[in-house]
Amino acid sequence: MTDAAGTGPPRPPARRPPFAAALAAVAVAAVVLRLAFVAVVDPQVPEIGDASAYRLLAVNLAEGAGYVRPFDELLLGVRRPTAEYPPLFPALLAIPSALGAESTHAHRVVLAFVGGGTVVLLGLLGRRIGGRRVGIVAAALGAAYPMLILPEATGMAEALYAPLVVVVLLAAQRAIARPSLPAFAALGAAAGAAALTRAEGLFLGAAVALACGVAARGGIAPARRVALVAAAAAVMVGCVAPWTIRNAVRLHAFVPVSTNYATLLDGANCDATYAGEQLGQWRETFSSHGDAARDLPQAQACFEGFDVADPAFDEAEAAAHHRDDGLAYARAHAGALPKVMAVRVARTFGVFAPRQQVDFESLEGRPRAWQMAGTVAFWVLAPLAGAGFVLARRRGAAVAPLVVTLAVVAAVAAATYGQQRFRIAAEPAVLVGAAVTLVAAARAGMAGPARPGR
Amino acid sequence: MLWFEREVVAALIDPRLDASTRQAVTDYVDRTLRSMPEHLRAGVAAESLLFGAWSRAQHLAGRLDRARLRTRVDRWRRSPFDPIRQYVRLLESLVLFAQHELAPRRVAAAS
């Protein structure tokens, strides 16, 4: 190697910090940024909402009250078993709660460190896809990406779901490179944990396992591929099964992970969300109509709330009722579904009425400006990610599981409603894909323009 | 009571009973299962979910109806695996008790 003029002595190779040290530095920066965000921005979550429910579920668990409906306990003093929310995230928050750190603020501090872990995992995934530099750039992008920071700062389950999705993708890389029963079993276990955090993890796990079965290297026989995918699925189901059995015992109904999907279907399938400015969104009517909402037909009722004051209230029965209402409306308006589903997907990817979408999403406690910053960041990163997937594929990297996360997010959004929070399963893939492109662009920039004759 | 338990109970009830008595028997089994100690109920629920998942898949594929389920339950009665035999025995004993306790009472009340 010579200097620019080609006349000087050979330059010693530049010393780069080891990958682990660089990744640790990025992770520390990520934690500091998250703690600063919590201290300075201090997002306020609604007292009745998902984030508050997670905190109360965790506190109840820590106090030995069991997994009970949080607001029934808080407002009515009634302890009813629940499966409205999957258990893993409240179980995580129950650990600091049991040690006395049970406030919203304390939980957010804990989740800042979880966010640091997510950044480390992103770095490892990036390294698997495109090498060390891609790993560090992916981690750095993740450290500053508002769509990862906001769930942690508002105490939402996506804060745990994101790292678990990255673990699923890391396990998928291993399963593709060295297909074996233990590798696919590990993939199934990671997917099971993800499913116990957000129910759509079941679909994600199944889709990623299938992609791994198809993409697995080493010229293995089709029957062996089927067996490996089946093993991953069996382990995933085995991980979820104890929770499903618990639900059968406590709720006397078959609830694989959560009853929340019924609420989703109910609020997403009504007149207000099939046309007009709330097309493709989710709508509740109990806050405007009170108990009278339950007397309205589904077309006007959307999600009319639960009659928790009824002493005979049964969560599983109520969920079945709401599910049936939503599905009946969807079936009766099947002609409108393609348009509604397309808008749901577009909203989830931040490209349909983004300002209105951000306003809607800020109702959950995410500061509007930061939610918009995250939306714009996604607009920048998504095309870079697309190019990154192509580049990585050409270099022989296994990008199928990453692309599958985007497909699963689109499918889940189409079946539920438009919400950027639901994109969380695809964010790691987007960050890693964008990192591949940025590193390739930096390399091309350092190499300089090609000179004629050289 | 879970879907599969309801199906097995329906298969075990004496087909000569009228609809309201069948419902009364089903309700009795439901109440009894609900009042079981949770650690015992968990085992029964686990078996119901396991058998139910397979049966549900066959049911959706049109390969399992109530008559075939009755044949299958008969086979489980003679299964070499004790937990399977005990599963059928538990539900059958509840059904038989309810039939003998409830059916004559309902007949007497009707007459």
Image (cartoon, coloured by chain):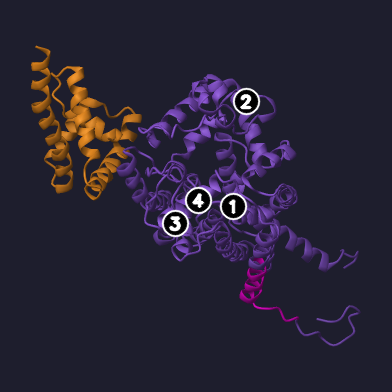
Label 3 element class: helix
**Label 2, label 1: how many angstroms apart (C-alpha)?**
34 Å
**Label 2, label 3: how many angstroms apart (C-alpha)?**
36 Å
Residue A376 located left or right of residue A111: right
Return the residue at label 3. A91
Disc 3 or 1, which lies upstream in sequence?
3
Choose between A226 and B111: the one closer to the eye: B111
Which quarter of the figure is the C terminus of chain A placed in?
bottom right
Expressed as whole percent of the image width and height from the top left, the position of residue B105 reads 9, 21
Return the residue at label 4. A54
Residue A5 located left or right of residue A424: right
Disc 2 or 3, which lies upstream in sequence?
3
Residue contact at pointers 2 and 3, CB within 8 angstroms: no
Q: Is residue A365 magenta?
A: no
Expressed as whole percent of the image width and height from the top left, the position of residue A150 reads 64, 53
Disc 4 or 1, which lies upstream in sequence?
4
Q: Chain of mark 4?
A: A
Q: Amino acid at mark 3?
A: Ala
Residue contact at pointers 2 and 1, CB within 8 angstroms: no
Q: Chain of mark 3?
A: A
Q: Chain of mark 2?
A: A
Return the residue at label 2. A272
> Could one spot residue A150 in this view of the protein?
yes
Q: Which chain is purple?
A: A
Q: Nearer the viewer, mark 4 or mark 2?
A: 4
